[in-house]
Amino acid sequence: PRVELAWAMKAHQHAQVYFNLISSVDPKFLKLTKVDDQIYSEFRRTFRDLKIDVLDPEDLKSEAAKEKWRPFCLGFEGLVEDFNYGTLLRLDCHKDYTEENTIFG
């Protein structure tokens, strides 16, 4: 529980910074890491059928999902700082960050 709480606190801090960034810069010009394109390509290859506009928590937290996410994240060890930290995600991208629309993954 303490580790997850620490991750949630770090994720909240990152979410605030990233939200400010994506709110002030056109996302097509925004690079959060040097390997953004590599991350996106690998994400699309690994999670080809994942619906990203409205997320299903089972696609993130089920045991089967964790078996796919774990190696995906580990693939960026040494390339991305905090590669294995959790993040806050909106379940429905068309809605704001609210307690009901946010999941820690």
Image (cartoon, rainbow, N blue to C red):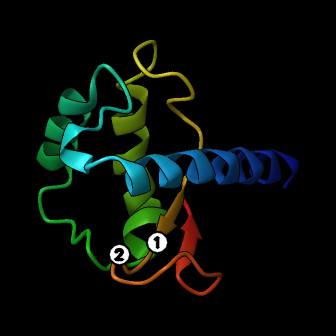
**Screen quadrant of the C terminus:** bottom right
Residue 93, numbered label: 2
For image coordinates 58% across by 45% down, the residue present is 17
| Up-down relation of residue 63 to residue 84 (above or below) | below
Which residue is found at the position 43% from the left and 41% from the top?
70
* Image position of 101 (left or right of 7): left
Q: Which mark is residue 62?
A: none
Q: Which mark is residue 90?
A: 1
Residue at x 41%, y 35% (from the top left corner): 73
In the rendered image, which quarter contains the N terminus? bottom right
Q: Quadrant of residue 52?
A: bottom left
**Image x and y of residue 78, in percent:** 45, 12
Which three-letter amino acid code belongs to the residue tagged 1?
Arg
Q: Secondary structure at mark 2?
A: loop
Judge left or right: residue 42 versus residue 102: left
**Residue 35 spot, x, y in % from top left:** 27, 23
Q: Are marks 1 and 2 in contact (CB under 8 Å)?
A: yes
Residue 89 lies, with reference to residue 83, above or below; the image says: below
Gap in angstroms between the C-alphas marked 1 and 2? 6 Å
Q: Position of residue 50 (x, y in %)?
A: 21, 66
34 w.r.t. 17: above or below:
above
